[in-house]
Amino acid sequence: MRLRSGVFASSCLLVEALGVALFLRGFFPLPVRSLPRSEARRDPPAEPAPPGSGMVSNWTKIPPPLFKKVVIVLIDALRDDFVFGSKGKQFMPYTTQVIEKGTSHSFIAEAKPPTVTMPRIKALTTGSIPGFIDVIVNLNSPALLDDNLIWQAKTAGKRIIFYGDDTWVKLFPKHFVEYDGTTSFFVSDFTEVDDNVTRHLDRVLKREDWDILILHYLGLDHIGHMTGPNSPLVGPKLHEMDNILKKIHISLLSKEGESSLPNLLVVCGDHGMSETGSHGGSSEGEVHTPLLFISSAFEKRSGPLTQPKLVQQTDLATTLAVGLGLPISRNSVGNLILPVVGDKTMREQLRFLHLNGFQLSRLLQENTPAYEKDPGYEHFKIAEKSHGNWIKLYLDGNNSEILLNLGKKVLKQYLEALKTLSSSLSKQVAQYDMYSMLVGTVIVLEVLFLLLLITPKALSSRAEFEVPLSPPLFSLLFYLMCLMLCAVHVIVCTSAESLCYFCSMSWLTAVGVMVLISALMCGILSAIGKILESSRVPVKNPVVSNSSWSEVDVLILAGTIGHVLSLGASSFIEEEHQTWYFLINTLCLALCQELCRNYFLLKEGDPQHSITLKQSFDNVKEAYECKNIDIPAAGDSKLGKVTSSAEFIKGSDKWISLASPWIILICCRLLRSLNQTGVQWAHRPDFGHWLTSSEHKSELSFLAAVSLVMIFILVQRKCSLVSKIAMALGLLGVYSYRAAIGNIIFPWQRDSKDISKGITEARFVYVFVLGIVFTGTKDLLKSQVISADSSVKSIGLWEVYSGLVLLAALLFRPHNLPVLVFCLLIQTMMTKYIWRPLKFDAAQITIMHYWFGQAFFYFQGNSNGIATVDVSAGFVGLDSYVEIPAIFLTAFATYAGPLLWAIHLLCYLSSEVSSVLLLPSLNCAAALYREAAKIILCRWVTVFC
Ligand SMILES: [Zn+2]
Ligand SMILES: [Zn+2]
C-alpha cells in the first residue's frame, strides 16, 4: 500500500496524541476520593463502645459545637515570616501582641504544591489534597462537588457570609446567604480588591444573623506578583490587615456574653510567595503560611514565645469541623489540631480524636484494597481498643491518677495513628497509574521508531512510500501479539491493587488499543526487515565519507543528544538552565577555537582553500560593484560580510572577531548573576533582588535608562527613519510607564509620588509597537507581492523584530532590561564577527539560535515551574482583566527570549540569502548567481565531505 507522506505524518501525529493522552492520564494522580456524598453513609459512633456487654457509651452523636461564631480571615499569599518574622513585629503590632500574650494558638501551616489559590481553597475546605490537574482548571473553577466544610455547615443550618475572591463563589455557588465576590485577575490593583471586602465589615460585625464569616483578601498577593515580597508596599498592606484583625477581634470579644459559647477568629494564608513574589511551586516561602486561632476560650499565653509548630494546611478543615460541631469532611486527610481543643476534658478530647481516626480509616478502606495491613489502620485499631478500656474505667467511676495517665497514653496512641493514616493517604495522591503510563509510552515509542525507520524514504523525491504490509509471517505474528497483549491486560487488571484508568475503560476500547500496538509493532518489524534486505544488495559506489566534522559540529550533535538524554532525570529538568548555560559557554569556546584556526592556521595550512575562497569573494565584490544603488539597510551587513570574509586576515575586525566569544562569555556570566532560577538554589540572593529592593531604586533607574538607550542603539541601525523615531519615542514611553507605576524614578523626582496604573503610558508604547510592526509587515508584503527587491524584505523583517523588542522592553520588569540589551548585543556580535566570517550553514546557525534562545529563557529568570511565570505582564496597559490580550502578553513576556532569537534567525537567514543571491540588480544578477552558486556548493561540499 502506498501512502502520501502527509497522510502518514498526520496519522502518526494522531496516534502519538493518543499515546501522550494516555500517559498523562496515568501521570496525573487521581485525588483520594470517598464515595459520592449523595450515597447514604453510616454515621460514625462518637465513642467506641467499651469492651464487655451491658455497658454502652452515652455519646453516640456528633459532639456539639465549641464555638458560636467563626470568622475566617484568609489573606492571599500571606507568608509565615510576614506574621512571625520581623515584618510582623514591625507592621502587625496587634496581631503580634495577641500571638505573644493573648488567648491564641499559632501554627505554621504547610501547603502542598501546587501553591495556587483554587487548589488551596479546596484543601482548606475539604481537607483533601487536590491533584496537579487542578492547576489547569484554576482559571475556570466549577462548583465543588466533594464533601466539604462549607457544605456541611450549610446543611447544618449555619448562615455563612462571604466577601472576597470570587473563586469561592464559583466553588460554592449556593452556599452563602450573602456574598460579594471580587475578581482576582486584575493583579495590578492593590487597594480596591481589599476595600471591596472591608467596606462590608462594619455593617456585618454589628449584625447577629450569621454564624460563619469568611473574608478573602487579595491585595497582598497582587503586591507580591507586581513588586515582590520585599516591596515597600507590603508593610502598609500588612498594617491594613492588622487593623482589620484588630477590629474583628474586638467586635467578637464584645459579642460574647457570659452564658454563650466563645467566638473564634481564624487567620490563615492560602499559600505564601517566593522570593520573586509569585507562587505555584514548592519553595519554603511558598508553602509556609501562618495559621492563627484566636478565641477567648483558650488560655492566655505566658512564658517565652516558641517557634510555632508545623501543621498541615488540610488540618484546618478537620479542626473547624470539630469546632463547629459538624461531621468531618469525608475526603479529608487532615488531623485534628489538638491544642485548639486542649482545654476540654480528657473524655471529650479522646472522643474528637476517635471521630477523626474513624473518618481517616474509613477513607483508607475505600481507597486501598489491602487497608488492613496499613500500619496507620493497625495503630488506630489498637488505640480504639485502649480507648474502650479507658471508657470502662471511666464509667466505673475511677477518677484516680491511673485514669489520667492511661488517658494520656491513649491520646498519644491516637495522635500517632492519625499521623500514620494521613501520611499513607497523602502518599496515594502521589501514586502514579503505572499501567496506563506504560501503555502510553509503548505507543509513543512505537510511533517514534516507525518514523525514524521510514523518514529517509519519505524525504525522497516521490514524497510517498510503501507501507510495509503483511507478509504471511507478520500476519500470524500480529494475531499472536494481539492475543498475548489481551491476556496481559486481563491479568494486570484483575490483579491490580489500586485503581487504574486504562482498566476502567470499556474492554472494546482496550482491545482496540492492543490491536493498534500490535499493528505498529508489525509495521516496525517489517520496516526493519526491508532495510536489512536492501542493505544486502552491494553498494555500487561507496559513499565518499571522508568526513570533516569540525569541533562545532561535534559539539552541536553531542549537546543536542545530551540535552535530550538529560531530560530523563527530574533534577536535570528542575535545573535545566545549568545545561543550557554549560552548552552555550562551551559553544563560545568552540567558536573561539574555530576563529583562531581560521585566522592563524588556514592561511598557511590550506592555501588552496583560501585562494579559492578569496577568488570567489572577489567575484562577488565585482558583482556588487556593478550595482551603484545604495541600499541603506542591508548594505552595511552585506558589504561587512564580503569585506570581513574576503580580507579577514587583516584589519581590526580580526581582533574584534577574536575577542567576541570572550565578550559573549562575559555577558553570559553577568546575565547569570542577574536572576537565580531553578528549584534548588532559587532562593539565593541575586543581582535582580538587589536591584528591586526599595533602597536601590536610583541604581535601578540608572540601569533601566542605560539599557533603554543601548536597546535603541542596537536596534535602530537597520530600521528606516520613521521606525527609528517611533522606536525612540516608544522606549521613552517604556521609561515613563515604569516610572508611573513606581518601579523606577525620574532623576528630577526625589520621593516617590503617588503610584498609578500607567495605563496611558503603556498604551502610548503599544501604539508605537503596532506602528513599527505594521510598517514592517507592509514592507514584507510589498516585497512578496510587488517587487522582488529583497532588501525591502529584510528591512521589513527587521522592523517586525524591532517592534517585538519594543514590546518586550515594555513587558520586562526594569531589572530584566539588561537581558534584552545583552540579547541584542550577542546577536549583533555573533552575526558580524562569528557567523559571517566562519560561514556556517543554515542547520548550524539554527541550532545555535535555538541554544541561545533557550539560555535566554532562563536568563530572564524563568524556570520549568509555574511559579516563575510573571503574570503581571498580562496587565500592562489594561484597565480590567481581558482574557485574550492578558494571556497573549503573559506568554510573550515569558517566551520573549526564545521568540526574539527565532525571529532573529529569520532575519539572519533572509539577509544571508539576499546578500548572496537576490540583492543585485538584474544587470549583475547573472554574474552573481554563478559565483553564489559556487560559494554555496563549496560550503555544502565542505560540510558534507
Ligand atoms: Zn492565592
Ligand atoms: Zn497569586
Image (cartoon, helix red, strand yellow):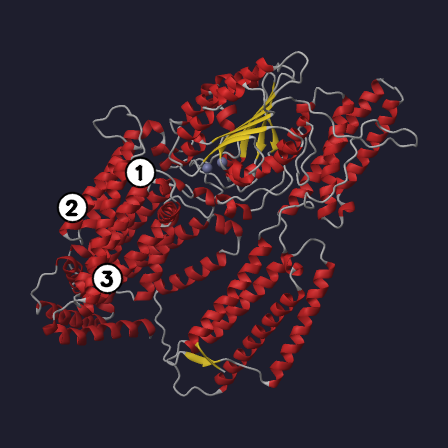
Q: Local crowd at mark 2 within 10 Å, few (<14), some, or many (≥20)? A: some
Residue 648, position in %: x, y?
Answer: 18, 62
Q: CA distance from mark 1 to mark 2?
A: 22 Å
**Could you tell me which secondary element the residue under label 3 belongs to?**
helix
Residue 247, position in %: x, y?
Answer: 50, 17
**Could you tell me which secondary element the residue under label 1 belongs to?**
helix
Chain-order first, disc 1 or disc 2: 2
* Residue at image location 72% in from the left, 20% down from the top: 344
* Residue at image location 64% in from the left, 69% down from the top: 511
Q: Local crowd at mark 3 within 10 Å, few (<14), some, or many (≥20)? A: many
Q: Which residue is mark 2?
A: 725
Q: Local crowd at mark 1 within 10 Å, few (<14), some, or many (≥20)? A: many
**Residue 836, numbered label:** 3
Residue at the outermost left position = 628
Residue 645 seen from this side: no
Chain-order first, disc 3 or disc 2: 2
Circle 3: residue type: Arg
* Residue at image location 23% in from the left, 45% down from the top: 767
Chain-order first, disc 3 or disc 1: 1
**Residue 814, numbered label:** 1
In the image, which is nearer the foreground, mark 3 or mark 2? 2
Q: Nearer the viewer, residue 917 or 142?
A: 142
Circle 2: residue type: Ile
Circle 1: residue type: Pro
| In the image, residue 54 above or below residue 680 | above
Q: Nearer the viewer, residue 668 or 85?
A: 85
Q: CA distance from mark 3 to mark 2?
A: 29 Å
Q: CA distance from mark 3 to mark 1?
A: 33 Å
